[in-house]
Image: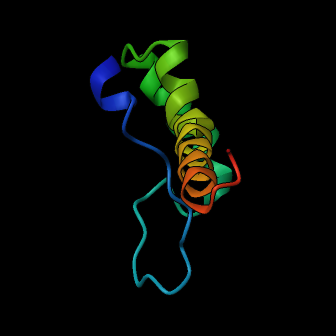
Amino acid sequence: MSKGSARAGLGSDFDGIPTYVDGLEDVSTFPALLSELSRRGWSDEDLRKVAGENLLRVMQDAEAVASRLTGAGA
């Protein structure tokens, strides 16, 4: 599963959507989602990536680019 999990993340913008998936009504259900993915064979590493590590990596990469473009990293 590692290729997809390196590029995916959980979203939590439920404001204004007309319908929900049963069992995923809001962010409080994310632990149950992660438990189900684990039950289906996702590794702990993949679950960590999807739960937030990917987002942190992308933000760090964006900050590095911004610093380079503004000369702050020089």
Q: Residue at horizontal 56%, vertical 62%?
A: 12
Q: Residue at horizontal 53%, vertical 73%?
A: 14
In the image shown, does 62 or 65 lie closer to the viewer? 65
In the image shown, does 43 or 61 lie closer to the viewer? 61
**Picture coordinates of residue 52 (x, y %)?**
61, 39
Locate the N terminus and report the quarter of the image it occupies: top left
Q: Residue at horizontal 54%, vertical 58%?
A: 69
Q: Residue at horizontal 71%, vertical 53%?
A: 72
Q: Along the horizontal axis of the image, is 57 left or right of 3?
A: right
* Residue 54 drawn above or below residue 19: above
Q: How many marks?
A: 0
Colouring mode (rainbow / by chain / secondary structure / one colour) = rainbow
* Residue 69 drawn above or below residue 1: below
**Picture coordinates of residue 51 (x, y %)?**
58, 37
**Picture coordinates of residue 25 (x, y %)?**
54, 63
* Residue 68 drawn above or below residue 42: below
In the image shown, does 62 or 58 lie closer to the viewer? 62
Q: Along the horizontal axis of the image, is 4 left or right of 23?
A: left
* Residue 21 drawn above or below residue 8: below
Locate the C terminus and report the quarter of the image it occupies: top right
| Residue that sits furthest to the front in the current view | 74
**Picture coordinates of residue 11 (x, y %)?**
50, 57
